Image: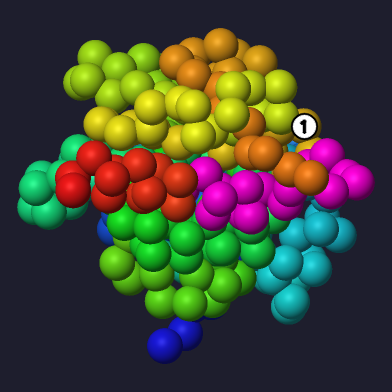
């Protein structure tokens, strides 16, 4: 199966893609172009909260290959996004407490694909990713997920912090990984839980960290002090699995 992203070139094709309900991850507009058709496309983009970038003609030429882009190029997701409600439905179908993995500004598609694969194997009911400053469901993400993308839903939200607040109202609590936190073995990771994984370089952002109920650290004995984001996600996710299994014995 192909997981390639779709590049949509030209004003009418882009507008029709939006109106047909196709998910557009990125929209590239020629800098300074603000005529009627472009304004119509931008109105549609706001409904999806698409990431819009104003770029040079040279950039658009390179994206469109043949240069006949009419000032606009869109990149559609390689795979469709779910709603957060779909994640709850998956947990309900399995008769389990919700277990979601939230990715705070993960930018590397290989990391997101690996986290998606881990989420599936750890029995998580889905991923939640932000629309801004983060990679979406690209072809690379789908390939690295090794098929997990077919089984584990990925919801994309406008504001991760607001989403956490809404999920707390539904009985969920949240833990993020950080080397300064409490040992993960000493944190109760059972019940309806959201595991927050931070950016590859800066970790979990301050605002999101402050919204987490617990901060868990992974005990390490080596000479360096950090793990790759996807590896950390795997270690913490399977500690959740271990604790859940022990509770159900």
Which residue occupies the foreground of this view, 151 or 6? 151
The structure residue drawn at horizontal position 56% and vertical position 63%, both measured from the top left corner, is 114
* Horizontal arrangement in the rendering, residue 67 relative to residue 115 (left or right): right
Q: Is residue 144 magenta?
A: no
Give the residue at the far bottom of this rendering. 1
* Horizontal arrangement in the rendering, residue 178 relative to residue 23 (left or right): right
Q: Residue 197, image x and y in percent?
A: 57, 38
* Horizontal arrangement in the rendering, residue 113 relative to residue 123 (left or right): right
Which residue occupies the foreground of this view, 145 or 45? 145
Q: Is residue 104 visible?
A: no
Q: Residue 96, image x and y in percent?
A: 16, 45
The structure residue drawn at horizontal position 33% and vertical position 70%, both measured from the top left corner, is 150
The structure residue drawn at horizontal position 54% and vertical position 54%, both measured from the top left corner, is 234
Colour scheme in the image? rainbow
Q: Residue 122, image x and y in percent?
A: 38, 57
Q: Secondary structure at mark 1?
A: loop
Is 72 drawn above or below residue 140 in the view shown? Answer: above
Q: Quadrant of the N terminus?
A: bottom left
Q: Residues within 10 Å of mark 1 (few under 14, many from 20)?
A: few
Disc 1 marks which residue? Answer: 202
């Amino acid at each position: 199966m192909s997981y390639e992203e779709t590049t949509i070139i030209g004003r009418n094709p882009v507008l029709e893609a939006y109106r047909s309900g196709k998910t557009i991850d990125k929209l590239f507009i020629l800098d300074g172009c603000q005529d009627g058709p472009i304004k119509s496309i931008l109105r549609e983009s706001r409904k999806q909260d698409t990431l819009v970038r104003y770029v040079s003609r040279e950039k658009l030429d390179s994206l469109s290959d043949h240069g006949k882009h009419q000032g606009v190029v869109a990149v559609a997701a390689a795979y469709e996004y779910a709603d957060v409600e779909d994640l709850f439905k998956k947990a309900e179908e399995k008769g389990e407490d919700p277990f979601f993995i939230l990715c705070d500004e993960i930018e590397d598609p290989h990391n997101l694909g690996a986290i998606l694969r881990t989420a599936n194997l750890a029995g998580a009911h889905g991923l939640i990713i932000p629309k801004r400053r983060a990679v979406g469901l690209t072809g690379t993400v789908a390939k690295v997920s090794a098929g997990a993308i077919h089984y584990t839903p990925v919801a994309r939200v406008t504001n991760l912090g607001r989403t956490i607040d809404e999920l707390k109202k539904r009985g969920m609590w949240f833990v993020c990984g950080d080397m300064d936190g409490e040992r993960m073995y000493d944190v109760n990771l059972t019940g309806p839980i959201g595991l927050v994984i931070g950016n590859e370089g800066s970790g979990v952002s301050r605002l999101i960290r402050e919204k987490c109920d617990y901060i868990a650290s992974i005990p390490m004995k080596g000479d360096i002090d950090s793990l790759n984001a996807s590896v950390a996600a795997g270690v913490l996710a399977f500690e959740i699995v271990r604790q859940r299994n022990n509770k159900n014995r």
